[in-house]
Amino acid sequence: MTRINLTVDGAKVSDDVEPRTLLVHYLRETLGKTGTVVGCDTSNCGACTVHLDGKSVKSCNVLAVQADGADVTTIEGLAQDGELHPVQAAFHECHALQCGYCTPGMIMQSVDLLKDNPNPSEDEIRVGLEGNLCRCTGYHNIVRAVQTAAAGASEGGQA
Ligand code: FES
Ligand code: FES
């Protein structure tokens, strides 16, 4: 076992983990952060996307020990003071989900995308989300949600 110390959704945590434990399993099984989901376990679907020191990563592709000392944000840490993050609100407003399984990862990836490119074109959104698979929506409303969040941010909100 290896001791890791990190911050998850604003709270400092410290745990003994096996060196082979994946970050996604640590988040879900040790910390109970089940908002982060596993869709494939092979780095294909993006459902497990979280932010590691502010950058999106597929948490099934990161060992928990690699997150030692890091700041991790999951979908559960995105809302602030009871208010949905603007990207969460835009997904809700645009009905950018059906079963919702891909949604946590889609939102985390979209937040990172908009941080790097606050006014993305439709093509840039599609490329930015290419590592996140959705089996339900056809992607159209997801793209619209990202555009809506971007427009809200440029009108003075924050994405
Ligand atoms: S569960 Fe991580 S990419 Fe699919
Ligand atoms: S809403 Fe079902 S997988 Fe995307």
Image (cartoon, rainbow, N blue to C red):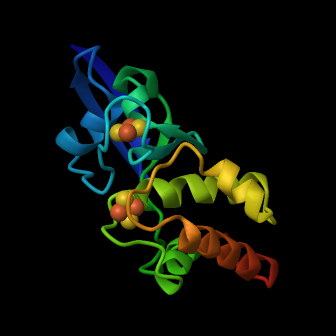
The relative height of residue 116 versus residue 157 in the rendered view (above or below) is above
- The residue at the point 48 percent across, 72 percent down is 80
- The residue at the point 44 percent across, 68 percent down is 137
- The residue at the point 50 percent across, 48 percent down is 132
Relative to 85, 156 lies left or right? right
Q: Quadrant of the N terminus?
A: top left
Residue 57 position, x and y percent, is 52, 38
Q: Quadrant of the C terminus?
A: bottom right
Among all residues in the image, which is located at the extreme front? 138
* Quarter holding residue 86: bottom right
Relative to 51, 29 lies left or right? left
- The residue at the point 46 percent across, 46 percent down is 50
Which one is nearer the viewer's eye here, 49 or 101?
Answer: 101
The relative height of residue 49 versus residue 6 in the rendered view (above or below) is below
The answer to whether residue 1 is seen in the rendering is yes
Residue 153 position, x and y percent, is 74, 76
Which one is nearer the viewer's eye here, 123 or 75?
Answer: 123
Counting labels gives 0
Residue 97 position, x and y percent, is 41, 72
* Quarter holding residue 111: bottom right
The answer to whether residue 76 is seen in the rendering is no
Which one is nearer the viewer's eye here, 148 or 2?
Answer: 148
The relative height of residue 19 versus residue 73 in the rendered view (above or below) is above
Residue 19 position, x and y percent, is 29, 14
The relative height of residue 30 versus residue 129 in the rendered view (above or below) is above
Taking the image in four quarters, ligand 1 sits in the one at: top left
